[in-house]
Amino acid sequence: MDTSGTHVWLVVWKTYDALHRQAMKSIESLNMCVSDFAVLELLLHKGPETINAIGEKLSLASGSITAAIDRLERRRFVRRTPSLVDRRAKVVELTDEGKALIQSAFTTHSIHMNSAVEVLSQIEREQLLQLLKKLGKHAQEVILEVVPDIANASHGSTES
């Protein structure tokens, strides 16, 4: 079995792609776009957040997050209120209708995603999560070390 870093990356990539397609299909079946679902899910599980915090947590550009919140506000799923700690900021929170919607949608989405991983036992899921977290943390640490080395190696070979 090929256990090289490149092969591990390819397997993780293909697995991510398959799970991502399942998630997108699930969210689309709920008649939502991904950004709207993500905002509602974040507010359900984290509580009210500022617009900037939502954008950072979801890795969405300012314009994208504003557009999503505008759509959700028009549908009366969220409301914006002034922040008590920063006059310039707005806090976004779920309305009762928005909370009911995302609780139902998230339950359905969870069923869909559980079906994608049902091939793994509970113990295998726990092991997989531990290993992926370990790998992700390490990859994040070494990425800054590896990239300059590659750049230096390519420059060094052309200078001779």
Image (cartoon, rainbow, N blue to C red):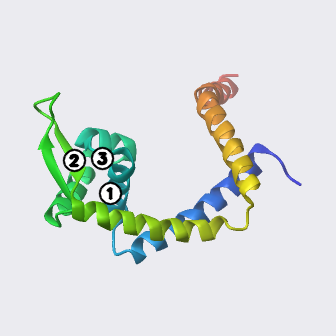
The secondary structure type at the circle numbered 1 is helix
- 3D distance between C-alphas at marks 3 and 1: 17 Å
Q: Residue at x 23, y 49 (%)?
A: 93
Residue wearing tag 2: 92
The secondary structure type at the circle numbered 2 is strand
- Circle nearer the viewer, 3 or 2: 2
Mark 1 belongs to which amino acid? Answer: Leu
Quadrant including the C terminus: top right
Residue wearing tag 1: 40
Q: Residue furthest right?
A: 1
Residue wearing tag 3: 61
Mark 2 belongs to which amino acid? Answer: Val
**Residue neighbourhood size for the residue with mark 1, other residues' Cα within 10 Å, grouped as few (<14), some (14–19), many (≥20):** many
Q: Are marks 3 and 2 in contact (CB under 8 Å)?
A: no
Determine the image quadrant of residue 30.
Answer: bottom left
Q: Are marks 3 and 1 in contact (CB under 8 Å)?
A: no
- 3D distance between C-alphas at marks 3 and 2: 16 Å
Q: Residue at x 30, y 39 (%)?
A: 53
**Which percent across, then down, holds residue 20?**
53, 63
Mark 3 belongs to which amino acid? Answer: Ala
Residue 21 in view here: no
**Residue neighbourhood size for the residue with mark 2, other residues' Cα within 10 Å, grouped as few (<14), some (14–19), many (≥20):** many
